[in-house]
Image (cartoon, grey):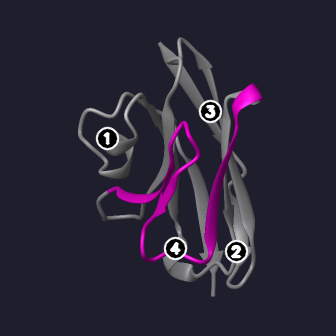
Amino acid sequence: QVQLVESGGGLVQAGGSLRLSCAASGRTFSSYAMGWFRQAPGKERDFVAAISWEGSTSYADSVKGRFTISRVYAKNTVSLQMNSLKPEDTAVYYCALDSSYTRIRTMAPDVGSWGQGTQVTVSS
């Protein structure tokens, strides 16, 4: 069983920055990918960013150039640096972990583990 705990959400004005972190514990795989997703009120959950075990990254078009995903292997953590935030970035942000980078990138229905989510609110 893998546990994921997100932190770092909050309220920020448009143009501001936030940094989200996600710590993984429990029975993680020997190598795994991690990613961030978000769900705005009344909308489906969307892919935001992913990072493979080797460090390859991918981003949704809506966040390219503004968000950066990174990981610290020794601490089993992944972070999401969010700059130039917009009101449309408001959502609950979820961390995910899977042995497959492809399943994370494509938000496959069988992604292994999810965090509980952290709220990000961007005011205009």
Q: CA distance from mark 2 to mark 3?
A: 22 Å
What is the distance, in whole Å, between disc 2 and disc 4 at their CAs?
9 Å
Q: Check disc 3 and report the residue beneath it.
A: 5
Rounded to the nearest whole Å, what is the CA distance between mark 4 and mark 3? Answer: 22 Å
Q: Residue furthest front?
A: 54
User: Closer to the N terminus: mark 2 or mark 1?
Assistant: 2
Residues at circles 3 and 1 in contact by the CB criterion of under 8 Å:
no
Span colored in magenta: 45-74
Badge 2 vs badge 4, beta-carbon distance below 8 Å: no
Q: Residue at x 72, y 51 (%)?
A: 8
- Residue holding disc 1: 103
Q: Which residue is mark 2?
A: 83
Q: Amino acid at mark 4?
A: Val
Q: Amino acid at mark 3?
A: Val
Q: Earlier in the sequence, mark 4 or mark 3?
A: 3
State which mark lies toward you, 2 or 1: 1
Image height check: is 12 above or below 95?
below
As measured in the structure, the alpha-carbon distance from the residue carrying label 3 to the one carrying label 1 is 20 Å
Q: Measured along the vertical axis of the image, is residue 105 above or below residue 17?
A: above
Question: Mark 1: which secondary structure?
Answer: helix
Mark 3 or 1: the one toward you: 1
Indicate the amino acid at tag 2: Asn
- Answer whether labels 4 and 1 touch (C-beta < 8 Å): no
* Residue under the image location 55 percent in, 22 percent down: 3
Q: Is residue 30 visible?
A: yes
Label placed on residue 63:
4
